[in-house]
Amino acid sequence: MKALFIGGTGTISSEITRQLLDKGCELYLLNRGTRNDSMPAGAKIIQADINDEAKVAELIQGLQFDVVAQFIAFHPEHVERDYRLFKDKTKQYMFISSASAYQTPLSDYRITEGTPLSNPYWEYSRNKIACEEYLMKQYRDHGFPITLVRPSHTYDERSIPLGVHGSKGSWQVAKRMLENKPVIIHGDGTSLWTMTHNSDFAKGFIGLMGNIHAIGEAVHITSDETVTWNQIYEIIADALGVKLHAVHVSSEFLDASSDEDFRGGLLGDKANSVVFDNSKLKRLVPEFVATTRLDQGIKRTVEHIMAHPEFQVEDPEFDVWCDSVIHALESAVKMIKGL
């Protein structure tokens, strides 16, 4: 198989890249080359900014691909550009969309690919929906061979997956746990969530590559494991070897109290209970099964981060904000009780 990845070094794509190279795929990465240390050995690098359409068209002249996979398109104009570049150059165009595009709030917590797409809370999700609609139109009108892939919360060894964190990543929450400080969990922590290790996601994605039954289809790829946010934070604390001190705060209050996009990331995504039905993926890729249980994956992630200080990026502003939110709640309780 001859494939071109636009991106190829992110949380989702890096493991797909690794597994494909292990299988002997002829893999090209179209990348700006700003993260040369993460470029996998064996991949053929096309160094360019995908937004420089004329330059990319020049570099791919004469090349044909079995699969082109787009990991870094977030607005309709991005996929419109891709259509112009690749409409005659690939047998399959795979677009990474998002499971956050599904109906929010859900009318049924069980999500299939037939669940409506609608998210009034998050512009990111609405843009992904617009990208899907454009690509589906090109498939219907012109036979452009698309496959739409919807990941949910996918993680790897470089970052601990969380619900509430600052702009610099998740390390500060782990640091608070290690320092015996309280950490914030949105809502009451009992809503249902699904996290998928990138090694499992890669198995499903690779199974869709070159798959004639996936053309014209939208498919989500997630684990079958469902956990609550309380369980997630307990798993993280256990992996760190500490006791969890949780403070539950409503998602609406967190959004109102922060400059972070908690309206999108929480109200439009993580605050909602989700359970994914992966039966469509398993029909298309019969061998697919997610084998990394969350506690196992989190343990590996924590071990990796603890052994690599470069991933321990502190976020003092977020730390102060957490203390302020918790103090505000404690003060409100005292005021109501007249203490």
Image (cartoon, helix red, strand yellow):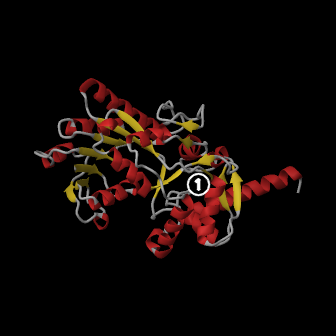
Report which quarter residue 34 is drawn in.
Answer: bottom left
Residue positioned most to the front = 286
Residue for badge 1: 164
Count residues near mark 1 (Cα–Cα under 10 Å), then give few for <14, some for 14-19, many for 20+: many
Q: What residue type is labelled 1?
A: Val
Q: Where is residue 73 in the image (x, y as percent from the top left)?
A: 34, 43
Q: Residue 301's spot in the image, x, y percent?
A: 49, 66
State which quarter of the image contains the C terminus: bottom right
What residue lies at 45% left-to-right and 41% top-to-bottom?
124
Circle 1 — which element?
Answer: loop
Asked whether the viewer can see residue 316, the reply is: no
Question: Does residue 333 appear to the left or right of 314 in the view shown?
Answer: right
Looking at the image, residue 192 sits to the left or right of residue 308; the answer is right
* Nearer to us in this view, 209 or 328: 209
Extreme residue toward the top, this view? 141
186 with respect to 304 (left or right) = right
Query: Where residue 327 appears, x then y in whole percent?
Result: 73, 59
